[in-house]
Amino acid sequence: MSDEIRDQIKGVIEGEDVALFMKGTPQFVMCGNSHRALEALRRAGAPVTAVDILPDPRIREELSGLSGWPTIPQVFVGGELVGGADIVEELEASGELQRTLRDKLGERQDAPEERVVTVG
Amino acid sequence: MTARLQELLREAFPGGEVAVEDRTGGGDHFQVSVTSARFEGLSLVEQHRLVYDALAAPLADGTIHELRIKTRGAS
């Protein structure tokens, strides 16, 4: 079961342009730091794919095992860990997040879409 | 609790500047700022990982409910 969750998480990280693992969903955010990360990504025009980690404690365990990052939220762009809320806010404010998105995703981010996928 | 976090960070970043703020007064939401030569040449992810390593114990035992991190290289 945990292996299955781990594989699904890997699939999201590697398969989605911008993956946001958060507490709650973009429609119903359950944590201040998840909110900060989501808003910074929105300001940067990122096509966010969100995963709610709250439904099953194993999601968070497996995610932190994979990323080596102990806290939530966690943001990945093009399969790479960008960081948590503080880093994403800092990179958005400096314009570096926007540059990273352009470099990794090309022009696809011109019509950003937000969606939620379920793991577990 | 603020003092304990400060001590852990000072041990991990000797000679650096460390500030810890209890954001809510409840002893579990913290803002930490660290300026250290150890951050030179590292990405933000790597810098924050060093802070997480220093605070691994209070993160693991649930003492820290929410952590905000600001890092700066000392030059």
Image (cartoon, coloured by chain):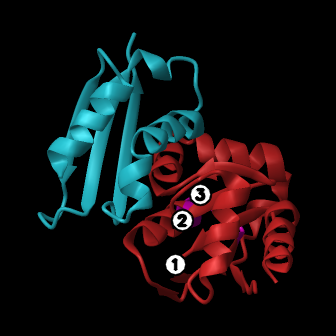
Q: Which residue is mark 3?
A: A44
Q: Residue B31 or A87: which is nearer the viewer?
A: B31
The spot of residue A117 in percent (x, y) is 75, 84
| The magenta stretch spans residue A83 | no
What chain letter is assigned to the residue under label 2?
Answer: A
- Residue A72: horizontal and vertical position, in percent? 52, 65
Three-letter residue code for mark 2:
Pro
Question: Are both tags, 1 and 3, on one chain?
Answer: yes
Report the quarter where the C terminus of chain B lies: top left
Q: Earlier in the sequence, mark 2 or mark 1?
A: 1
- In three-dimensional space, the C-alpha distance between marks 1 and 3, rounded to whole angstroms, equals 20 Å
Mark in the foreground, 2 or 3: 2
Rendered colour, chain A: red
Q: Is residue B43 above or below residue A84?
A: above
Identify the mark at residue B6; answer none if there is no mark.
none
Q: Which mark is residue A23?
A: 1
- Residue found at the very far left of the displayed protein: B25
Q: Would you name the residue on which mark 2 appears?
A: A73
- Secondary structure under badge 3? loop
Whole-number angstrom distance, CA of label 2 to CA of label 3 = 17 Å
Look at the image and give the residue range highlighted in magenta: A41-48
Q: Colour of chain B?
A: cyan
Name the kind of residue labelled 3 in the image: Ala
Q: Is residue B70 left or right of residue A72?
A: left
* Viewer can see residue A2: yes
Secondary structure under the numbered disc 1 in the rendered image? loop
